[in-house]
Amino acid sequence: MTPNSTDTLSMIFSALADPTRRKILARLAHGELSVTKLSEPLEMTQPAVSKHLKVLERAGLIERGRQAQWRPARLQAAPLKEASDWVEQYRQHWEESFERLDAYLKTMREEEVETDETRPVEHSRLSRIRSATTNRLWPNRKGE
């Protein structure tokens, strides 16, 4: 990765970190929309939505057009692909880590089963010791 692409990735992930901007991108995935249309379901002012759009535009995630006074925003998929490719590099590492964790948990379960099989003997021995101790301390008690 070049330093410039890392800077781009930082801007992309920073833009994606905000849930409002992710909602905007989800809506733009269905086609271009104006600030007015984007602000309606978000319960935000148009200037607030415009600020979010500027962040998305700087990250390269959207493009703003101009049709007379209407400035529609449209999704740009290439930066999302770049972020996805970066994350994919680490997927193999995560999968291997999870496989090791699964193997460890399986070993732990097997050891637990082996221990459980020896517990009835230990449990009955402890019960006898407890009963004998109780009988010595309180000889008049019944049923213990």
Image (tube, rainbow, N blue to C red):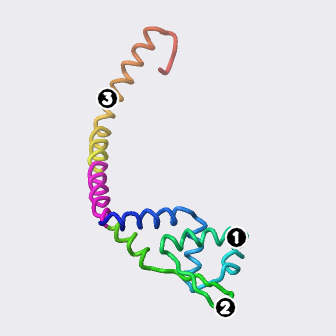
User: Picture coordinates of residue 29 (x, y %)?
Assistant: 54, 81
- Amino acid type at circle 3 is Glu
Q: Residues within 10 Å of mark 2 (few under 14, many from 20)?
A: few
Q: Which residue is mark 1?
A: 47
Mark in front: 1 vs 2: 2
* Relative vertical location of residue 30 with respect to residue 88 in this rendering, above or below: below
Magenta stretch encompasses residue 100: yes
- Amino acid type at circle 2 is Ala
Q: Determine the residue positioned at 66% across, 77% down.
A: 38
Q: Earlier in the sequence, mark 3 or mark 1?
A: 1
Q: Is residue 33 left or right of residue 107?
A: right
Q: CA distance from mark 3 to mark 2?
A: 85 Å
Q: Which mark is residue 96?
A: none
Q: Quadrant of the N terminus?
A: bottom left
User: Picture coordinates of residue 139 (x, y %)?
Assistant: 48, 9
Quarter-of-image position of residue 40: bottom right
Camera-nearest residue between 69 and 110: 69
Magenta region, mostly helix, strand or loop? helix
Q: Determine the residue positioned at 70% across, 70% down.
A: 47
Q: Is residue 113 left or right of residue 12?
A: left
Check contact, mark 3 vs mark 2: CB within 8 A: no
Quarter-of-image position of residue 124: top left
Q: Which mark is residue 122?
A: 3
Secondary element at image label 1: helix
User: Which stretch appears magenta?
Assistant: 89-105
Camera-nearest residue between 15 and 141: 15
Q: Residues within 10 Å of mark 1 (few under 14, many from 20)?
A: few
Q: Earlier in the sequence, mark 1 or mark 2?
A: 1
Q: Which residue is mark 2?
A: 68
Magenta stretch encompasses residue 94: yes
Camera-nearest residue between 143 and 46: 46
* Relative vertical location of residue 56 with respect to residue 64 in this rendering, above or below: above
